[in-house]
Image (cartoon, grey):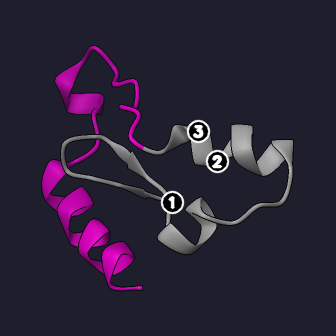
């Protein structure tokens, strides 16, 4: 699972297309494309620059 710099959840394509049962489907696959809930205080939110760095690593896998 990765989080885009725009705070969107992305699931690895191999896992996204796997068929294994309801826990996988509802626990992970259904999260694909959803926005994460952010703290109201901006100083408590994840760094978009750091998310961008980590998302590049996630997408390369």
Q: 52 and 20: which one is in front?
A: 20
Find out whether residue 43 is within the magenta segment. Answer: yes
Location of mark 2 (residue):
28
Find out whether residue 5 is within the magenta segment. Answer: no
Is the residue under label 3 in contact with that under label 1 (CB below 8 Å)? Answer: no
Q: 7 and 41: which one is in front?
A: 7
State how far apart marks 3 and 2 are (Cα): 6 Å
Q: Is residue 53 left or right of residue 54?
A: left
Residue segment shown in magenta: 33-61
State how far apart marks 1 and 2 are (Cα): 8 Å
Instruction: Please give the name of the residue rendered at 21% of the width and 71% of the height, measured from the top-left corner.
Output: 53
Location of mark 3 (residue):
30
Q: Is residue 20 above or below residue 38?
A: below
Of helix, strand and loop, which one carries label 3?
helix
The C terminus: image quadrant = bottom left
Is the residue under label 2 in contact with that under label 1 (CB below 8 Å)? Answer: yes
Say which quarter of the image contains residue 26: top right
């Amino acid at each position: 699972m990765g989080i885009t710099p725009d705070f969107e959840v992305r699931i690895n394509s191999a896992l996204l297309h796997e068929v294994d049962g309801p826990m996988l489907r509802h626990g992970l696959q259904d999260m694909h494309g959803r926005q994460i809930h952010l703290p109201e205080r901006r100083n408590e939110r994840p760094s978009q620059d750091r998310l961008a760095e980590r998302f590049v690593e996630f997408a390369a896998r």
